[in-house]
Amino acid sequence: MPRRAGPDGEGSMSAPQEADRKDDALARAIGWSQQWSAEFPYRLANHLPMILVAMQRMGADDRRLEEFCEIYRVQNGLVPVPAPKETISRENWRDALGDREREGDYRKFFQGEVRRLGATPAARLYLPVLFDGFAASAMHAFMRMAYATLTDNDEETAIALAYWAATYLDLGTGRGEAGTTDDPVEVLAYMYRPSSFRHIVTECDLLWHNMRAVAAKPEFAPVHDMLAIGPDTMDRFARLSLALFAATGDFSLLHALTGTHWLRMMAPRSPDPTVPMRRFWQAIASLIPKIGFPDFPAAEHVEEWRRQKVPDWPEIFAEAIRHDDEHDLSLSFSASEEFKLYRDPLYNYVAAKRLGLM
């Protein structure tokens, strides 16, 4: 990434000037990141633009953002966007859903749609179809759209839509039947019963391969319709995801915790928020076999973790931005944002534990 220019003149900047400078540095870093494909070999999610936002909001300076760009490029072997092959139009855009070789075509198409409609109107037009493929790139297209919404970035919105389309993965639509439970834990508990979920075979160990293999089992079909979504469903997602991650530290459950934050970020672009909520929890349920059917933590254990002395967020942020692991950074930022809503010290606990502070 090109080095930033030095400051003009001497003396300190005002607070607005300093904020503008930091935003300019972030914009340059994200702009540089956009030359790379949304995935790198072998079909792993490129987190770079989202992590740059998280790092800056946790206090990373310009030099650290630039340094992280180069570290991330080298250690992951980022690759260019696939060259365009054929024109995608408003008439045929559904025809190539799930074809990763068409990422370049989809980028060009959605760049045009964002210019034509604006970022949020374009997202609200196309996301209702894309939500059916919510598991795209193991939910990382959803992550990219959430951060594009947070930053209101036109180019990131177009790229997120293209990423979602090119990696689209439908786990099954269900039959529109009435929900049988309002408790998200009951949906996950269902996954422990069919013996077929104990024998999942995949071509490789990628998360989305596991999700696809689970969804192919006939016994998975009821999961889509199982949850009756109500006004407290998001809070239940958050509490359960936090407790399960605290109990296991599992990589897949990290995405359940961060995913509740992403749902909130993406809400302005969700015409019917119950649709992504339902698809999100279906996706989390599909990961239960991959996680190894974990035990649900006892309430007294959760309370014991909650009562531990935990670092405050400035200490967590200072440690997080020294890390090069994208999941350390993603978790720390999302946990801090969810803490603002719930004021639960368990968020400090899981972030600090992940970072080695406890």
Image (cartoon, rainbow, N blue to C red):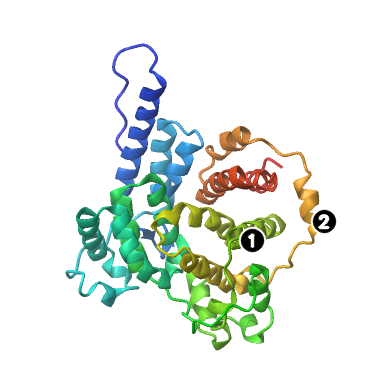
Residue sitting at 33 percent across and 51 percent down? 156
4 shown above or below 243: above
Residue 36 visible in the shown view: no
- Classify 130 as above or below 220: above
Q: Position of residue 265 (x, y in %)?
A: 46, 52
Is residue 302 left or right of 53 when viewed as pictured? right
Quadrant (top left/top right/bottom left/bottom right) for the N terminus: top left
The residue most toward the bottom is 218
Residue 75 lies, in percent from the top left, at 44, 50
- Viewer-side residue, 242 vs 230: 230
Residue drawn 67% across the image and 69% down it: 185
Task: Please identify the quarter of the rendering in which residue 137 is found.
Answer: bottom left
Q: Secondary structure at mark 2?
A: helix
Q: Which residue is mark 2?
A: 300
Looking at the image, which residue is at 61% across and 38% down?
316
Q: Is residue 221 above or below residue 317?
A: below
* Image quadrant in which you'd find residue 23: top left
Question: Callout 2, which amino acid?
Answer: Glu
> Cα distance, mark 2 to mark 1?
18 Å
Tell me the kind of residue under disc 1: Arg
Pick the residue in front: 229 or 296. Answer: 229
In the picture, residue 160 is in which quadrant?
bottom left
Of the image marks 2 and 1, the number of the one nearer the N terminus: 1
Q: Which residue is mark 1?
A: 236
> Is 149 rendered above or below residue 57?
below
In the orientation shown, which residue stands out farthest toward the left?
Answer: 87
